[in-house]
Image (cartoon, rainbow, N blue to C red):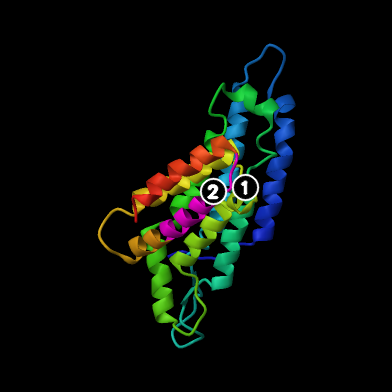
Amino acid sequence: MIEAEVPQRSVQARLRNIDRVVPMLIPATTRLGGSYEPLREMWDALITQRHRELNAVAKVVGGVEETRHQAGRGIAPFQPVPAQEQRAAVKFLLKHAFSTPRAMLDPEVMLRITPTGATDGLQDSNLKLLERMIEAGVFQRMAEAQALTPKAKVYTGLDLLYDLNDGLFAELNAERPSIELYRRDLQRAYATLILERVEGPPSEFRAALRLGAGDLLEKINKALKKTKDLVSAAHLYDLSVELGKVQ
């Protein structure tokens, strides 16, 4: 059972502290003539801590709150996390997890860690967060919450996908869309996850994924007509072709 109620302000404060540590990494972990391995280890530790904080927020999506009390006292012990809390959690992740983490991408640190793939740890964290939310069990709990509390305002799997489409592809709203490498990598990971998980027999999960993919495809095709950046156009065209296979 998944319990919710994450103090997002506290998580945000801890994320800011992680950002503040980044400029201190080089002087704290290196010495003249020494190895950069301690720097790499400390960087990996920061990524792990950052993911732990963000994952606590991701648990709210499709979550269930449990109030432990004896039978006959109070309401039923299990209640779906309120829709507004789930939507707020997704909004938080879009802002603090999936936006380009400028503070974390300090070139002075990145160019000392590895010749290539320095952002892999961050993107791996992004993918794990998306996998946690875009999961059949999460969508089923959302569907059950809608069925069990028909008069309540609920947050559905399709709502989640639409919010992710809007946030992860926010660049498409620009007059001349241009998408930087970090975000292109993230968008590809998201589209690939949808394409992989839409396979299988009919289900609440697959039905939502198909409609969500269609919504994203429409957004991409509209943006393709506006963008003048060739790299962004190639990226969007590639995603359009792949997502078109779902329809």
Among the two numbered marks 1 and 2 on one chain, the one whose residue lies closer to the N terminus: 1
In the picture, which quadrant includes the N terminus?
Answer: bottom left
Q: Residue furthest left?
A: 201
Label 1 neighbour load within 10 Å: few <14, some 14-19, many 20+: some
Foreground residue among 97 and 170: 170
Identify the residue at image location x=61%, y=46%.
177
Task: Tell me the number on the disc at residue 99.
Answer: 1
From the image, state whether disc 1 or disc 2 is nearer to you. Answer: 2
The answer, for residue 124, to whether it is visible in the render is no
Task: Tell me the number on the disc at residue 225.
Answer: 2
The image quarter containing residue 85 is bottom right
Amino acid, disc 2: Lys
Judge whether 204 appears above or below 173 on screen: below
Foreground residue among 216 and 51: 216
- Relative image position of residue 154 (x, y in whole percent): 50, 75
Foreground residue among 96 and 27: 96
The image quarter containing residue 206 is bottom left
Task: Tell me the number on the disc at residue 120.
Answer: none
